[in-house]
Image (tube, rainbow, N blue to C red):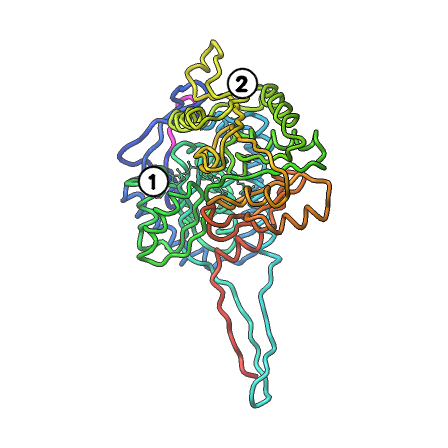
């Protein structure tokens, strides 16, 4: 793909195609247009769904598990063979740092295909030897069939990682897919289509349509009568809209949604580790990770020292050109998202926050002044009822509040409509286990953040989602078990 005159097409039934309208692709570093993206109309989506159905009932549906999983390994190798192209494309769409794109986003694209190909091959089924009234006995065993034609809708913050986190298990379980990446980040999804094509994935197995949500490809997919299931990662309110769209057809849904994640730093914590760990969990990817910390609770005895230390960390972040190897943070994804984050920076002041650092837009004196940049920001002094403490901002910002007792800390951390991730910083092993059990969150890290084992259940409670992804949890969602009872 030529990034200078980028023209991003859909991938339908094994062919790259255009449609009737297109939209610009913009680099948020300096606001330059880097190409154009075709927007799928209803007819394009209809063709993609029909191609997926035909593949499911054809070559792909008849292919062995081993054959499918060997192809997924080929895809992983194809991503790695074009690693630098994927890194460049991800950075151009998002402005994320070279460090982030090359150590997290793109490696996980390949890893996601490998983990689910291997787990699908090694996962057996259930079998029971059952008693019967006449004493002859019965054998109960289950087989897993694919759900069918699956719509995959993914967000812009970790574009390849989150697309393949859904796509890989869906294909490993034998489904066919129509994927719609975020309109903000079309590039690596299109590269992936090239890799899938070259890897020999049969036509119609993986289809890619570009576009927006309402009134565009996203809505055309979620309301399509021949879609069998929907897997979505994005904002909670979008999840509500998709639930409404899917309700008529009672479609299975997998949702990974928003968060307002808390970190709790206890008085016995390794102070330096906690400061560095919280800085990482607040500012990674400019705070544009669903698992990022936006609420920090620090034991009163450490509070002033911790605030000062985290401020020092924020000021030491290199907010700069994404391609520079020591850059920690780039711009936000778009001007629209920057306006949202800046509106919370203004709101924080209106709600009476102390702005410890940040709260505005950095000045570079070069082309970056035309990009979607904000300053890393730390707040204190707000009540727990403040909107900046309750609502997801999804930017490089956190609010720090003191606590005196465990009970107080847990109560504040759990007082949220979200329940995705929590981080506990303590050396007390008993407290770590005891409080991890009490957190209203799908994922709890102790003395670490974003350490990932892809076999573990990943997802959130409350407004943070429905279901879990990861390992057998993903394969279970993308499968329909049938139990068979044989009387002996
Ligand atoms: N829980 C997780 O694992 C996780 C991971 C990443 C991001 N997120 C969340 O995602 C959000 C940021 O991502 P975003 O801004 O791309 O989210 P978003 O909801 O705006 O968009 C996500 C995707 O949904 C599509 N979409 C939007 N409206 C739609 C509709 N009505 N019907 C069908 N498709 C529609 C978009 O085009 C995009 O592809 C944050 O809230 C973040 O917390 C959650
Ligand atoms: O922004 C959300 C990040 C999600 C990360 C994962 O789903 C993962 O690491 O598997």
Q: Earlier in the sequence, mark 1 or mark 2?
A: 1
Residue extending farthest to the bottom is 134
Q: Is mark 1 within 8 Å of ligand 1?
A: yes
243 left or right, relative to 378: left
- In the image, what residue occupies the spot 49% across and 56% down? 477
Q: Quadrant of the C terminus?
A: bottom right
- In the image, what residue occupies the spot 31% across and 55% down? 225
Q: Is mark 2 within 8 Å of ligand 2?
A: no
- In the image, what residue occupies the spot 48% across and 51% down? 170
Part of the protein shown in magenta: 3-8
Element class at badge 2:
loop
> Considering depth in this image, is 363 or 298 the residue closer to the camera?
298
Q: Are marks 1 and 2 in contact (CB under 8 Å)?
A: no
Image coords of residue 103 (percent x, y): 60, 32
- Residue denoted by label 2: 320
- In the image, what residue occupies the spot 44% across and 14% down? 369
Image coords of residue 200 (percent x, y): 49, 45
Above or below, 325 relative to 167: above
Q: Quadrant of the N terminus?
A: top left
């Amino acid at each position: 793909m030529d990034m200078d005159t980028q023209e991003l097409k859909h991938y339908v039934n094994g062919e790259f195609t255009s449609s009737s309208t297109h939209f610009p692709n913009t680099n948020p570093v300096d606001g330059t247009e880097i190409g154009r993206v075709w927007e799928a109309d209803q007819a394009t989506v209809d063709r993609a769904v029909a191609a997926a159905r035909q593949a499911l009932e054809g070559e792909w549906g008849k292919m062995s598990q081993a054959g499918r999983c060997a192809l997924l390994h080929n895809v992983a190798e194809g991503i790695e063979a074009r690693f630098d192209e994927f890194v460049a494309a991800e950075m151009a769409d998002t402005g994320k740092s070279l460090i982030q794109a090359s150590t997290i986003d793109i490696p996980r694209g390949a890893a996601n295909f490998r983990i689910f190909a291997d787990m699908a091959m090694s996962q057996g089924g259930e079998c029971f030897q059952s008693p019967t009234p006449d004493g002859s006995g019965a054998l109960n065993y289950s087989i897993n069939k694919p759900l069918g034609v699956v719509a995959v809708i993914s967000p812009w913050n970790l574009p390849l990682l989150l697309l393949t986190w859904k796509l890989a298990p869906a294909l490993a379980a034998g489904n066919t897919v129509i994927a719609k990446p975020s309109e903000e980040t079309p590039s690596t999804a299109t590269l992936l289509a090239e890799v899938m094509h070259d890897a020999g994935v049969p036509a119609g197995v993986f289809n890619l349509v570009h576009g927006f949500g309402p009134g565009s490809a996203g809505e055309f997919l979620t309301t399509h009568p021949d879609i069998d299931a929907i897997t979505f990662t994005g904002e909670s309110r979008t999840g509500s809209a998709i639930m409404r769209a899917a309700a008529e057809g009672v479609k299975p849904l997998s949702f990974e949604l928003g968060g307002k994640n808390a970190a709790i730093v206890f008085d016995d914590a390794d102070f330096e580790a906690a400061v560095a760990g919280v800085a990482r969990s607040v500012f990674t990817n400019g705070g544009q990770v669903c698992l990022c910390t936006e609420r920090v609770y620090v034991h009163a005895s450490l509070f002033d020292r911790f605030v000062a230390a985290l401020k020092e960390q924020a000021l030491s972040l290199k907010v700069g050109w994404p391609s520079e190897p020591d850059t920690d943070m780039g711009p936000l994804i778009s001007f629209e998202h920057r306006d949202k984050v800046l509106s919370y920076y203004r709101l924080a002041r209106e709600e009476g926050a102390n702005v410890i650092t940040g709260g505005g837009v950095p000045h570079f004196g070069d082309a970056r002044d035309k990009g979607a940049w904000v300053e890393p920001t730390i707040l204190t002094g707000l009540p727990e009822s403040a909107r900046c403490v309750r609502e997801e901002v999804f930017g490089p910002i956190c609010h720090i509040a003191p606590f005196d007792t465990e009970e107080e800390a847990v109560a504040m951390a759990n007082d949220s409509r979200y329940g995705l991730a929590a981080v506990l910083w303590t050396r007390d092993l008993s407290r770590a286990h005891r409080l991890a059990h009490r957190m209203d969150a799908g994922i709890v890290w102790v003395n670490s953040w974003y350490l990932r084992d892809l076999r573990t259940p990943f997802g959130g409670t409350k407004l943070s989602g429905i279901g879990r992804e990861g390992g057998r949890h993903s394969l279970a969602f993308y499968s329909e078990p049938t139990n068979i009872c044989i009387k002996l």
